[in-house]
Image: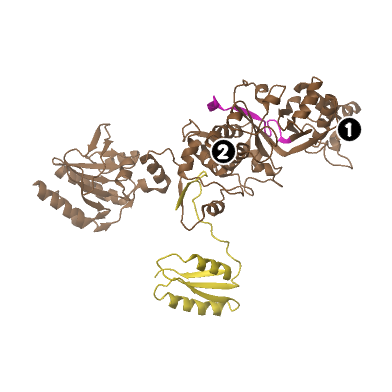
Chain colours: A yellow, B brown
Amino acid sequence: MTVIMDPTNERAPVARQISARPPALSGTVALLDIAKPRGNVLLDRLEVLLKARAPGIEVRRYSKPTFTKPAPEGLRQQIRAEADFVIEGLAD
Amino acid sequence: MRQLPAFLLEQPDGTGVSFPSGRRALVCFVKEDCPTCNEVMPLLEALHRAFGAHLDVLLPGQTADGNAELTDRHALTVPILDDSRLKVSFAFDIDTVPTLFVADADGREQQVLVGFVRDEWQALAGRLAGELGVPAPAIDWSALPSWRPGCGSKSVDPLIADRLRAEAENSPLRARRIEIAAQDDPFEFMFDQGFSDGLPLVPPTPERVLRMLAGTRRDPQEVVAVMPPNMGEATVEKIAINAVMAGCRPEYLPVVLTAIEAICTDAFNIHGVMATTMGASPVIVVNGPIRHRLGMNMKLGALGQGNRANATIGRAVRLAVRNIGGAVPGGTERSTLGNPMKFTMSFAEWEERNPWEPLHVERGFAPDDSVVTVFAMTSGPVQMVDQESRTAAQLAGSLGMCLEAAFNPKMHYSTDVLMVVCPEHVDTLIRDGYTKADLRARIQEITARPIRELVADARSGAGFKEAVAARMSPEELDRRLPKFRQDSDIHIVVAGSDAGKFSGAFHGWATGEIGSQSVSRKIEEAD
């Protein structure tokens, strides 16, 4: 972890910038199973709902080898390359 | 058993109370605006009355005014100790008030109660009574709630926790620390946060900022300027952080600090310079011995890239204006086109190649003073080409003709100019004995136009309005106006390589009191 000193006048909180919200749901949605028990149940249901409500989209499934560690670099790159959105079944 | 931190705090009467004292102690941190603390104050008073002969009841209170209010509100006889600087709260590493520590005679922790759990407090009172052989305090426990969470300790308030940590570590750094997660790229993170001018920044780690601060004798918390547009406090530390990001070496810092003092004066008016749609930015000229110590470029390519001091001093100033002052393009920085000088523009004058007085001496400083001069430019360096003139009058005439274009050839008395005369042009001027005054006078002479030529017409709507001209007499219309309102609006420095007949000019912004006036400041630390 790197620590840096805030160069600003500190009037605004430090925040990660969130990606701009797309105007519409289109393209490919990644569903990432982090390998926690029953995460797949949640994602199965989400896939059904997504396909019903946004028929034009493609849903792709991905999974992490273990929930205890960050997603491997290769998997993150793959999702970034293949998908426009990602929904992660985070924790239980 | 944890050894609790020793402390010495003042009671309201000004006398000190120390911990450990050789007696057992109850140490309870309290804060006036916390409802749970108010709930337990009568209990603490009762514990003090019951056990005070045998143990110390020590109540560090977190706000000076609040401590007095608590004492009055609950008619306390037990003194509340002044921990309004929060050093003891921080040292005890508490998150919550009230937090009650039970300590033995040597100050070792025996028990900790966080918040208020009635059964815990009741059990403690009973146990202490038994151990000390005194009656338990008369408390109607059934009237009290069974549980109340505490409140956040003031020592973990995000606004001050970093300062407390720095003080505890005896660090001069007080700025907020930002932790960048291991998976984040620090360079991308700084772009995302909007700290950058568009180019990569050096991450301002605490280590680098400390090294940068070694470049000045000034106190890191000294407020160098209150910086528009957001009136952010530009402390030495904050400026040092921006100087690290810009790529400065520590020895550049005194120049950056002085330049920031200069641009934040009412005369220079950095607010207007940043906010104008015209696209202005400070040019920083450095004079005096410090030029050599920093290895600044004043010769070949002085106004260009390739020299770290030239490149980063100007950038540090601009980053400080962005990050501390809050002047961000699209916010209060509203330049129509912008200009590349907004990244950085600083250079040194080649005084040794200058046959005249250098800029700082002309402005009243001693030759041995190191001085920063700031000038608000809107365009330039505009190249002024004349490879043919062999007399001073011809060459000065050429320079004047080039300067007519500042703003618009029909706009006279509108701006000022910073001329950078190249050595070969200097030689031509000096051969005919030209002084700076002669050069200025010739420029004014050659640019002078009858007012009737400066009136709005079919060629150009700029200049004097037709209605104004219509009220002028023929004599007035024949009066010749030079380009600049006064000769002193032509600022002159010498820089550039020995070869090449190419001088430069930075055209100014609105000048005088309504706009920006060039400001020179001595770098006090440079001696």
Q: What's the CA distance linking mark 1 and mark 2?
A: 43 Å
- Image quarter of the C terminus of chain B: top right
Q: Position of residue B381 (x, y in %)?
A: 73, 38
Q: Position of residue B313 (x, y in %)?
A: 60, 37
User: Would you say A55 lies left or right of B377 here?
Assistant: left
How many marks do you count on the picture?
Answer: 2
Going 68% across and 41% down the picture, which residue do you hit? B341
Reading the image, the residue beneath label 1 is B452
Closer to the observer: label 1 or label 2?
A: 2
- Amino acid type indicated by mark 1: Arg
Let me know if residue B140 appears in the view: no
Reading the image, the residue beneath label 2 is B227
Going 86% across and 30% down the picture, which residue do you hit? B449
Quarter of the image holding residue B400?
top right
B167 is higher (above) or lower (below) than B434: below
B150 is higher (above) or lower (below) than B405: below
Q: Which residues are magenta?
A: B506-527
Q: Position of residue B406 (x, y in %)?
A: 78, 36
Looking at the image, the residue that sits furthest to the right is: B474
Going 34% across and 48% down the picture, which residue do you hit? B153
Q: Position of residue B263 (x, y in %)?
A: 61, 34
Does dot 2 land on a helix, a strand or a loop? Answer: strand
Asked if badge 1 and badge 2 are on a common chain, one would say yes
Label 2 Cα crowd, 10 Å radius (few <14 / some 14-19 / many 20+): many
Q: Is residue B514 magenta?
A: yes
- The subunit letter for the residue under badge 2 reads B
- Amino acid type indicated by mark 2: Met
